[in-house]
Amino acid sequence: MDLSSIAETYIFMGHGMSQPEEEEDEEEEGAGAPQTWSTDATVSSDGSPPDDLRPSPLVGQDISHLTKLRTAPSEMCLSLCPRARRGTYVSTTNMLTGREANVSGRGRFSSSERSHVLSRYLPSTRPWSIDKMSSKAYVSQFSADGTLFVAGFQDRHIRIYSVDNGWRVQKDIHARNLRWTVTDTSLSPDQRFLVYSTMSPIVHIVNAGSGHAGEESVANVTEIHEGLHFSNNEYDGHGFGIFCVKFSTDGRELVAGSSDDSIYVFDLEANKLSLAISAHTEDVNTVSFADESGHIMYSGSDDSFCKVWDRRCFIRGRAAGVLVGHLEGITFLDSRGDGRYFISNGKDQSIKLWDIRKMSSNTSAYPRRMRYTEWDYRWMDYPTYCRKLKHPNDQSLATYKGHQVLRTLIRCYFSPVSSTGQKYIYTGSHDGCIYIYDVGILLVNWCITHQLSGIAVGILSFLC
């Protein structure tokens, strides 16, 4: 069987970087904080930066300072390394020595010290296969605590793997009313329920628990898959498709983006659609709540715009603001969870970092899309001359390039706050690699290569 017709689920575990740790504390005077480069930087074949790079404006931004605070060692740990300065790494050996000597007085690492140690250990080895299916995988995601892993396939299978039990299949869900593929899945915050979407206005919810390992959940045969109607007409099962669906932090609502250019919010307690917004002029590929409050939402569309929606002052479907900078459609966005920063992956082959304080309130001031060529990412390579183009009104804080966003809605995420302080951004790529960027260093920090004969790595999750 041809490899392009086989989907394999790969898991990447953390291993140390190749540089010896002890060398980090002996940096030359002036080494200080990590070196940063221009927001338009791309990666050369040998991983070295281009010659014309300039210092990045990200250095002075709040997010750079916040990231350092989340991953910085304490002053007491720094005192163990006379040559170390604020912004540099303290070796793991010295960190452990300080903990054993109880230099902090707490007898344990603080959250920032824990992140300082763990953020140095990125996935660096070849992946291994944990499962094989006869169709392509389109979505995957770890649960918030990393104990479960969910993967959705084109042949209607959705598998929940138990990470702590040797990646055994905890539940094998057979999706109901499948059209084309499973487009998205989302676990509830308490991990009791899972919702899944397809190219239909009906999202289904199913119990994520299992009576025994490997239990099959066949829609309305072995278990009820309740349909949640996101269309005002509950008899309309083919009006539009849903590309993305997400639980709110409290588990009471779902937010979804659709092929009819709209955003929908579903109230699970009332079991009805609570909000429908005609949000964009093209498909809404991605949508997310900004923080735990649920008041603010982000959306990204094929019209190339990122929009911010505030439900507290929502007037006639008008966005609170718009952020421009992508030249092509947006495939995915991920919130940092603080109601201020988020990242987006674009078909212009770039990830952008945004601060909503820079958004424009005039949502009609910009053209629909800065198209320089008739190009379709589903079957064409991105034009070479377009790679150096930049939006004249780019409002992003930083741009990360090097990966390829082709053929499918490739995702990107911030790395976990608990283990890395969200220091990294990681993304899949059409070239079969996973790229990891440092938020403060606008070049590829690490690249995991594993070619899969034409299978785009559009699904991935990060677990440390």
Image (tube, grey):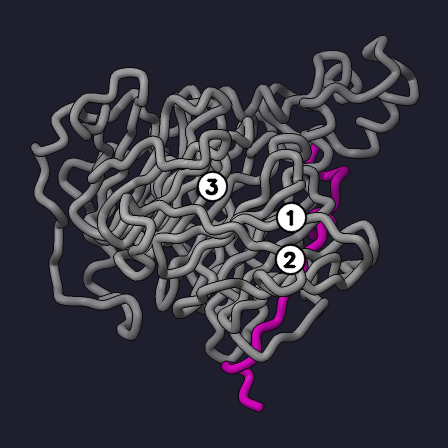
Q: Residue at x 70, y 22 (%)?
A: 111
Residue at image mark 1: 207
Q: Image quadrant of residue 109?
A: top right
In the drawing, what numbered circle is on residue 431? none
Horizontally, residue 461 falls left or right of residue 322, namely: right
Q: On screen, 153 above or below 312?
A: below
Determine the residue located farthest toward the bottom in the rendered image: 1
Residue at image mark 3: 246
User: The residue tagged with tag 2: helix, strand or loop?
Assistant: loop
Q: Give the class, few, some or many, for how many residues have Cα within 10 Å of label 3's Cα (few <14, many ≥20).
A: many
Q: Residue at x 16, y 47 (%)?
A: 281
* Image coordinates for residue 69, horizontal then vertical, percent: 58, 19
Q: Residue at x 56, y 54 (%)?
A: 225
Q: Give the class, few, some or many, for how many residues have Cα within 10 Å of label 2's Cα (few <14, many ≥20).
A: few
* Image coordinates for residue 84, horizontal then vertical, percent: 68, 23
Amino acid at dot 2: Glu
Residue at image mark 2: 223
Q: Are marks 1 and 2 in contact (CB under 8 Å)?
A: yes
Residue 19 magenta: yes
Residue 77 magenta: no
Q: Are marks 3 and 1 in contact (CB under 8 Å)?
A: no
Q: Residue at x 13, y 66 (%)?
A: 374
Cα gap from disc 2 to disc 3, whole angstroms: 22 Å
Q: Earlier in the sequence, mark 3 or mark 1?
A: 1
Q: Are marks 2 and 3 in contact (CB under 8 Å)?
A: no
Q: On screen, 260 above or below 181?
A: above
* Image coordinates for residue 227, horizontal then vertical, percent: 47, 51
The region drawn magenta spans: 1-25
Mark closer to the observer (1, 2): 2
